Amino acid sequence: MQFQKTMDEIRHNFYLIKGPADELDTDLKHLLKGYKQTTRNFSGLYEGDLSIFAGLEDEFIIEKATLEDIMYYMTRKERA
């Protein structure tokens, strides 16, 4: 895997999205670069503009992704 972005671009464009497992539908899976799901929760890596999640702050936890998060989710077998 090779990154072609600066660290600044990475810090401003990648986020962890977390929420209840029943919210992880097909549409959301397609938005995520990779994800991890348990019977109760999910977490996944999102790259892009967070405005798509506007108004959903009560349903999801959104955090800035670390470089370790990005590497982990980009290599996950569970992908959209």
Image (tube, rainbow, N blue to C red):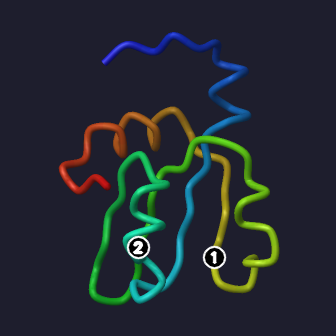
Circle 1 SS class? loop
* Location of residue 20 in the rendering, given as x and y in whole percent from the top left corner: 47, 85
Name the side, left or right, on which 26 lies relative to 56: left
Does 61 appear above or below 64? below
Residue 29 picture quarter: bottom left
Circle 2 SS class? strand
Q: How crowded is mark 2: few (under 14 residues within 10 Å), some or many (20 or more)?
A: some
Name the side, left or right, on which 52 lies relative to 80: right
Name the side, left or right, on which 9 lies relative to 27: right
Quadrant where the C terminus sits is bottom left
User: Which residue is the site of mark 2?
Assistant: 42
Residue 30 picture quarter: bottom left
Instruction: Say what amino acid the circle numbered 1 marks.
Output: Phe
The residue depicted at 36 percent of the width and 58 percent of the height is 35
The residue depicted at 51 percent of the width and 32 percent of the height is 67
* Location of residue 10 in the rendering, given as x and y in whole percent from the top left corner: 63, 27
Comparing 1 with 23, the one in front is: 23
The residue depicted at 61 percent of the width and 49 percent of the height is 15
User: Which residue is the site of mark 1?
Assistant: 60
The residue depicted at 79 percent of the width and 57 percent of the height is 51
* Location of residue 12 in the rendering, given as x and y in whole percent from the top left corner: 73, 34
* Location of residue 40 in the rendering, given as x and y in whole percent from the top left corner: 36, 89
